[in-house]
C-alpha cells in the first residue's frame, strides 16, 4: 500500500495537536505525531 503525508484541515490539525498535548501530560515527554494516510 502507498501512503503520503496527510493533508489536514484545521479541525484535524487541532485534534493531532490535542493528542500530542495529552501524551505530554501523561508521559512528561514531547512526542511529535506524523499523520500519514493511504493514497486512494
Image: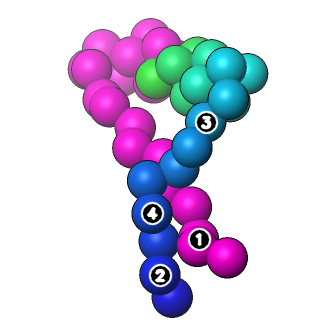
Instruction: Determine contact: label 2, label 1, CB under 8 Å.
Output: yes
Residue designated by label 3: 8
Residue at 67 percent across and 29 percent down: it is 9
Residue at 30 percent across and 14 percent down: it is 28
Q: CA distance from mark 4 to mark 1?
A: 6 Å
Describe the element under mark 3 as helix, strand or loop: loop
Instruction: Determine contact: label 2, label 4, CB under 8 Å.
Output: yes
**Camera sees residue 19:** no
Residue at 40 percent across and 37 percent down: it is 33
Residue 34 coordinates in the image, percent (x, y) = 39, 44
Residue designated by label 1: 38
Instruction: Determine contact: label 4, label 3, CB under 8 Å.
Output: no
Which of the numbered marks, if any, corresponds to residue 7?
none
Residue designated by label 2: 2
Which of the two labelled residues, at mark 2 and mark 1, occupies the earlier sequence position? 2
Which of the numbered marks, if any, corresponds to residue 4?
4
Which of the two labelled residues, at mark 3 and mark 2, occupies the earlier sequence position? 2
Q: CA distance from mark 2 to mark 1?
A: 6 Å
Image quadrant where residue 29 sits:
top left
Describe the element under mark 1 as helix, strand or loop: strand
Q: Is residue 23 above or below residue 40?
A: above
What residue span does the magenta drawing correspond to?
Answer: 21-40
Residue 27 coordinates in the image, percent (x, y) = 36, 22
Amino acid at each position: 500500500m502507498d501512503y503520503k503525508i496527510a493533508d489536514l484541515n484545521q479541525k484535524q490539525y487541532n485534534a493531532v495537536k490535542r493528542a500530542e498535548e495529552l501524551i505530554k501530560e501523561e508521559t512528561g515527554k514531547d512526542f511529535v505525531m506524523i499523520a500519514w494516510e493511504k493514497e486512494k
